[in-house]
Amino acid sequence: MKKMRKTREKSPPRSMTVICLLVALSMLAVWGVGMYCLTEVVAGYATKPFTENYSTFARSLTTHLSLYEDYIKELDETTENYALSRIWETLALASHGKSYGTGNEFYEAGDIPFAKALSGTVAYKDVCNYLYAVFDSEGNMMANSDEDFLYFSCITEEEWNSLDSVHYPDGKYIKVPFDRDKLSEETQESSLSSIAAALRLEGHYKDTEFIPVKIQYIDKNDYYREMDSEVNKVWHVARVYDLPWHTVYEDSGAQTDGAETVTVYADSFRNCVANPSPSFTYMGEKYENLLELAQTLGPQLAESSRAITQSSYTYGKATIIPSVYYSYTAGDKQSHSETNPYYANGQLNYFGLFLVYCTPKLAAVKALKGVYQATFAITLVLAALVCLIIRRHLVKPARAVGQALMSTEPYADIVPYPSRRWRESLTLQNGFENSKNIQQQYIDEIARLNSALDYARTAEENRRRMVSDIAHELKTPLAVIHSYAEGIKEHIAEDKRDKYLDVILSEAQRTDLMVLQMLDLSRLEAGRVKLSREPFSLIKVTKEVFGRLDMLAQEKELSIEYVFPKDFEFNADRARITQAVENLASNAIKYTPQGGKIIVRVLNDKSGVSFTVENESEPMSKDALSKVWDAFYRTDESRSSAGTGLGLAIVKNIVHLHGGACLVRNTAMGVQFGFTI
């Protein structure tokens, strides 16, 4: 069970992953807090106009509705439905978020202050819904702005055809409700009043309303272009001939109820645009829209002194702002008040209720959309930059040092990522370099101790073999020296005395060289040789060795080819490596036939530094290849040649002491000897 649990354990995450996540989360948290605070500030700016300006809309609109009532009554006697048009006009103003001000000027809330300076323009109408409703004294709703309709002074077809700059008839005002879905696409995207210079409607009357079946218009651009021409300088659009009528609305399914279809015209018109709100909660009760809330508040406002107890009510993201204004008669004077006139001894005529559904925070979010995107992108860039700096100057050097320390290679030539800007990364690199030097010393010492241990284990066997080999190798030169010395002593062949002496000296030198090499080999095998490492050029050493052996090569007319890379420095014991190269070089020259070829190669790659000598000769047997590095071993063919049989054994011990390996193999040209460290 324990083993199964261990296998299921996940490996720990990479430090760079954790750092990136922490940095990203930290910076995103800071960004989120900053954007939240900024949104609250902008939302405060956005809420202020709602609570200050829109809370007085009921007063303004109700005042506009009853303004100059005597004048309205007088006009209503001469112009049919003028009083109704006043109501329609008030509803249209409310639907567009406008109120009536002094000097008969209209006020419309502009863009959100402060937010516009930070980002794009967001109008209040994009985040608000309005409703204005008119109630009678009983609290019954008379009219509301939650519908789509046009209203204008109607011109009959006969009057339209006779219109000119002098004669302008007083038509009656009509209301034209329409289905917004049946408008053309271009009109749904823009206001009809912005593109139409005049309207032609086909339909039928129903009480004070006109039910349209088809609506056409004359394009304003066509009209103004015609007005600017030199030929036609007319005052009224009806007198501009041959301008095309464009169809903007068709409702073939409109109910006529048998009424006569007529055609009417309008050269000036306004429209009310329904602005339905989503569902919301007000004073603990849920409402589907503002119209439902108005229908609920109407009877309450007619009966109580002040049904609206607070200027605004916020639930969640939405804020509901109600505003009511009463019109009443006190004595012979018409008055207006925010208080029910029942408590002022007045006669209530009607009252207006203006409701606003707004989302200031949504307005702030829309206004700051560009700021969110820009700051979020900057935050991501900064987070990536911070992670990159940490990775470059801390994580990457630490990872490189860790990989180097975990390397199984005894002489790992791994250089950590060079970063010396931060103290921690510098400490890591210095510590790695120190540990690498100590490790290398330990490796050298272990190699020496291993050599000594191997020597101790095989000491007896080596001693017996050495004694046998020494006796065998010394037997021949001593026998030669003894026989020639006796010949000189007995005065045999006096004429060859000098020759005998030369042979005795040659064999004595050979014996002396053999003894020196045996002593050197004995020290190497016993591990009593300590290496003195220093950087040097192996290529330069190779050239120097073959330079000293050049005379021997010329005597045998040998061809030597060098294959060297770009010069580099090699860290080892220069004297011992020189000895190994010289033994391999002299061995190659010795066993290469007259006029033969030698190829010398030096290679520096990931596996280490290699030196090989390939000479032209007969291939060696498998048995010879396996024993060629043994002391005193020579092939049967080479027993009679000069040499001690210790050179390759010395090479093997020098290379092993450096932690390397020797190689020998048959090639297409002959035999190749070498080593890799």
Image (cartoon, rainbow, N blue to C red):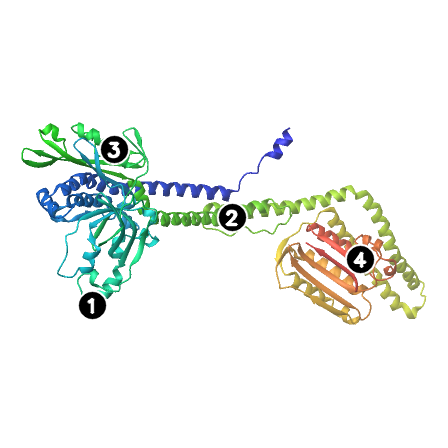
Q: Badge 1 is on which residue? A: 232
Camera-side residue: 674 or 399? 399
Q: Where residue 203 sits: x, y (%)?
A: 27, 49
**Horizontally, is 339 left or right of 603 in the view?**
left
Please report whichever mark, 3 or 4, sits nearer to the chain's N-terminal start: 3
Q: Quadrant of the C terminus?
A: bottom right
Indicate the secondary structure of the residue bearing disc 1: loop
Whether residue 272 can be seen here: no
Q: CA distance from mark 4 to mark 1?
A: 134 Å
- Which labelled disc corresponds to residue 351? none
Indicate the secondary structure of the residue bearing disc 3: helix
Q: CA distance from mark 1 to mark 3?
A: 53 Å
- Which labelled disc corresponds to residue 512? 4
Q: Are marks 2 and 3 in contact (CB under 8 Å)?
A: no
Q: Closer to us: mark 3 or mark 4?
A: 3
Q: CA distance from mark 4 to mark 2?
A: 59 Å
Camera-side residue: 106 or 80? 80
- Which labelled disc corresponds to residue 295? 3
Please report whichever mark, 4 or 1, sits nearer to the chain's N-terminal start: 1
Q: Closer to us: mark 1 or mark 3?
A: 1
Q: Badge 2 is on which residue? A: 396
Q: Which residue lies at the image location 67% right of the left edge and 49% below the top edge?
A: 530
